[in-house]
Image: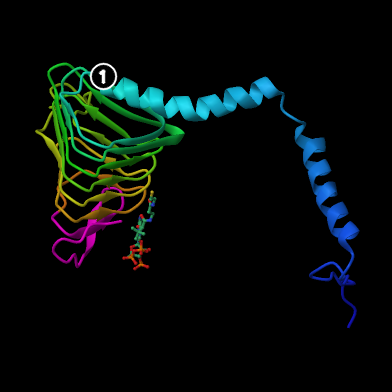
Amino acid sequence: MMGNPVKEVPDEAPAGDTAAVGEKHATAADRYRGTRGRRPVWRRAHDRLAVVARPRLSYLRSRLSGTERFGEAPLISGRLRLEAHGRVLIGDRFRAEGLAAPVSIYVTRGANLEIGDDFYMNGGACIEVWHDVKIGNHVLMAPFSSIIDDDRHPLEPGQVLYKGPTVVGDNVWLGRNVAVLPGVTIGSGSAIGANSVVTRDIPPSSFAVGAPARVIRKLEIPPGWVRP
Ligand SMILES: CC(C)(COP(=O)(O)OP(=O)(O)OC[C@H]1O[C@@H](n2cnc3c(N)ncnc32)[C@H](O)[C@@H]1OP(=O)(O)O)[C@@H](O)C(=O)NCCC(=O)NCCS
């Protein structure tokens, strides 16, 4: 049968053929330089400084943002926008990874945000607090997931925009692009699948998906187990 001719490529250069190996590497490096160009020294120094300084700045800003309590050992990389005009309590080991997109927390004047220990926010995740949001320990927010506790705009006259506190229990995982809408409670241990919209309460240890999010099964979470 006629097929495409396949050229045999040896896994390794023949023994003793170090020049061939060296040449291969040099060619790859040259190709890299040819396409990207070599960055000037000042540019490389600037990039290196930015990598080191940005997380430090985010960290400093968050410490100075007016939070009433910012727990021990936070780990912030990339950009974190934290505007705390209300009462904000953040537990220990807060982690934010605003590398691909900034992470943001906004708490308006007079509002209340409580976040437990070991909380994690990935790039683009955001929390907007106009009244009262409570988040437990070991909560994970995947990229672009969001929590907001006020509808902000009425669909029609007379609509209630604030329906009560928004509560996320301990050990809850919000998947990528999950939207937690105002006034819902997500029970401890639950997980919400990617792209879901949580419009109603979710009982503890449940796996819910969809828009609107519906519980599709119960999760078996042994006591004391937390999601890594
Ligand atoms: C949590 C997750 C991994 C669970 O997926 P899973 O292992 O497939 O879940 P299950 O096997 O229990 O799925 C049960 C059913 O729900 C469906 N399902 C799973 N996740 C879904 C989702 N996010 N939206 C709609 N349906 C979903 C499955 O297709 C399956 O349907 P079927 O029975 O008709 O085949 C998945 O929902 C998810 O969100 N993945 C992305 C996680 C993420 O955001 N990671 C970023 C971390 S930083």
Q: Quadrant of residue 185?
A: top left
Q: Quadrant of residue 7?
A: bottom right
Which residue lies at the image location 72% right of the left edge and 23% below the top edge?
Answer: 40
Taking depth in this image into account, of 3 and 133 the one nearest to the observer is 133
- Quadrant of the rendered image holding ligand 1: bottom left
Above or below: residue 64 compared with residue 216: above
Q: Residue 45: horizontal and vertical position, in percent?
A: 61, 24
Residue highlighted by disc 1: 65
Q: Residue 32: horizontal and vertical position, in percent?
A: 77, 41
Q: Main secondary structure of the magenta part?
A: loop
Which residue lies at the image location 18% right of the left edge and 35% below the top edge?
Answer: 182
Q: Residue 181: horizontal and vertical position, in percent?
A: 22, 38
Q: Residues within 10 Å of mark 1 (few under 14, many from 20)?
A: some
- Please provide the residue range marked out in magenta: 203-228
Amino acid type shown at disc 1: Ser
Taking depth in this image into account, of 210 and 87 the one nearest to the observer is 87
Looking at the image, residue 52 sits to the left or right of residue 8; the answer is left
Q: Quadrant of the C terminus?
A: bottom left
Whether 218 is among the magenta residues is yes
Q: How many marks?
A: 1
Q: Quadrant of residue 128?
A: top left
Q: Residue furthest front?
A: 16
Q: Quadrant of the N terminus?
A: bottom right
| Label 1 element class | loop
Q: Residue furthest bottom?
A: 1
Looking at the image, residue 178 sits to the left or right of residue 131; the answer is right
Q: Residue 11: horizontal and vertical position, in percent?
A: 79, 70
Whether 192 is among the magenta residues is no
Which residue lies at the image location 88% right of the left edge and 53% below the top edge?
Answer: 23
Looking at the image, residue 129 sits to the left or right of residue 179; the answer is left
